[in-house]
Amino acid sequence: MKPFAEIVDPFDLTAREWVIDLEPLAIHSIARRRLYIRGLPSGSYLPAGRLPGLPPETTRAVTLDQLAALLESRPIQELRKPPLIREHSFLSDVLGRFVATHRTEGIPLAEALRLLEGLTLTMAMTPKSRKKLAKKANSIPFAEVLDTLGPGLKASRRRWGERLLAGQARDCQLLAEDELLKHELEEVKSTGRGLSFALRARVDQAGRLTLGAWFCQLRKPEWDRLWRNPRWRSNHPSEWAEELLAAKTHTHTRAIKEQLARDRKEYKIEAAWAAYGRWLGEHRSALQDIELLLGELSIRVETSNEVTD
């Protein structure tokens, strides 16, 4: 099995989509387990379903299900003595310097959630994700794979961590544009005219089509190609939205569909972590678990809600 998570983009969508449609409690359970494992020493890619070390009072390797049960039934401090992030672990190499610098003053909850999203991404290839991740792993240059298996591992992890800490804006602009455009097209459709005829009539002499706050300006040959498209007979706003977005971006509808699918996943990922953040703000013991697993990094929660156990 090839290394995956430590050498791909830390913002890889496939590796981050595990949170979609999960309740906060389920997210917490998985995040806590992954942080626990990734705080243990590891020098290579580990097989799915096994731990790189043994918790106290065990004599053989523990499965992920057994570890999950232990984390649900016993305090983390009983399962591992400090420091919870061990030297030569994934978390130590990726986050060690950052934690040492910010441990005292702490970080805002929003920043903690951003880090958690990157630190808990999918590493192991489950049956559900194997095809997706294997396809991506097979495209990774062999030299980069060697970095995760030899002396270059620590440096590779630190570069990975630098990218994670620098952050990357979540861009769902195309999805927002698609939603706006579909709303405007519904308004046009409500007039009773076919969309193709109504849209053609709205293109001015300069080749500009305006629909509310959305506009698209094309040359006459480009508009002519659009009107000759077999889908022009369609009266579905969603189909016309794809056609118009493809025309505006000078691409094709397949690319638009793929990008919209990615944007919808990003939107769901963002919503899931936001819900988890609100849940953490209301459950002190859960928040303390995350702080401990991040190397006793204090997390500041700015909320007026009452925090419970």
Image: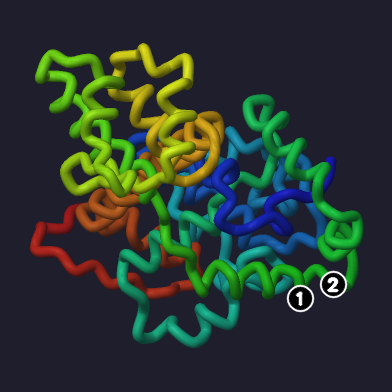
Q: Position of residue 157 (x, y in %)?
A: 70, 69
Q: Quadrant of residue 183?
A: top left
Q: Relative to residue 6, is residue 246 drawn left or right?
A: left
Q: Residue 152: which disc? A: 2
For residue 308, which quarter of the picture? bottom left
Q: Amino acid at mark 1?
A: Ala
Residue furthest to the front = 205
Mark 1 residue crowding within 10 angstroms, few (<14) / some (14–19) / many (20+): some
Residue 191 in the image: x percent, y percent? 10, 19
Residue name at image x 52 percent, y 80 percent: 98
Q: Position of residue 213 (x, y in %)?
A: 19, 48
Check disc 1 and report the residue beneath it.
155
Q: Is residue 161 above or below residue 55?
A: below
Asked if labels 1 and 2 touch by Cβ distance under 8 angstroms, the answer is yes
**Does the rendering let one see residue 281?**
yes
- The residue positioned 66% from the left and 46% from the top of the image is 123
Q: Amino acid at mark 2?
A: Gly
Q: Quadrant of residue 29?
A: top left
**Left or right of 301, for residue 178:** right
Label 2 crowd bin: few (<14), some (14–19), many (20+), radius 10 Å: few
